[in-house]
Amino acid sequence: MYQKEILSLDDAWAAVTAAITEANKEPGRPVAIAVVDEKGDLIMYAAMDGAYPLYKYMAINKAYTAARMQRDTAQFDDWLRETNRDMATWGDSKYTRMAGGLCIVKPDQAYLPTNPRQGNVLGGIGVSGRPSVDDVKIAQAGLNAIKF
């Protein structure tokens, strides 16, 4: 029998809470946050008051892409450029190359961005609503809150 670690609702809650706490350092700039499992299925979603509706789908798609491609969305974008591939190659309209999606990988597993399928990918976290560098910073705060 196989045994597999998964993200719990408590893990997702901790990530979303930490991400909102980070985002609230600039409360006038609302964001949306999504956490998905390793298949890209939504575990939790939250949006700050006043978040533009499109941010929801962007946050979910960023988390989905990070989980399914087993790498951060910025790394996925870099890889697409390096391999001269296009988004249509994957046949999945939910994939995005926008930064702000981070792959959730158990830290005691070997995870190399150049070979992302090494390690235990548990899911993804996505943030949308600010410039990419800020979305990544907020997502990282959420990722750091997950206790493995």
Image (spheres, grey):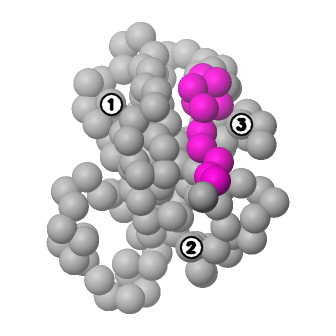
Disc 2 marks a residue whose amino acid type is Arg
Mark number displayed over residue 106: none
Asked which secondary structure carries label 2, the reply is loop
- Within-10-Å neighbours for mark 3: few <14, some 14–19, many 20+: some
Instruction: Determine whether label 2 and label 1 are within 8 Å by CB.
Output: no
Residue occupied by mark 1: 56
Give the alpha-carbon distance from disc 2 to disc 1, as whole Å: 27 Å
Q: What residue lies at 43% left-to-right and 26% top-to-bottom? A: 45
First in sequence, mark 2 or 1: give its number. 1
Disc 3 marks a residue whose amino acid type is Ile
Residue occupied by mark 3: 146
Left or right for 141, reference 121? right
> Is residue 143 depicted above or below 72 in this figure?
above
Q: Position of residue 87 (x, y in %)?
A: 24, 70
Give the alpha-carbon distance from disc 3 to disc 2, as whole Å: 20 Å
**Does the magenta portion include 80?**
no
First in sequence, mark 3 or 2: give its number. 2
> Is residue 26 depicted above or below 102 in this figure?
above
Q: What residue lies at 60% left-to-right and 44% top-to-bottom? A: 6
Q: Where is residue 148 in the image (x, y as percent from the top left)?
A: 77, 43
Disc 1 marks a residue whose amino acid type is Lys
Mark number displayed over residue 117: 2
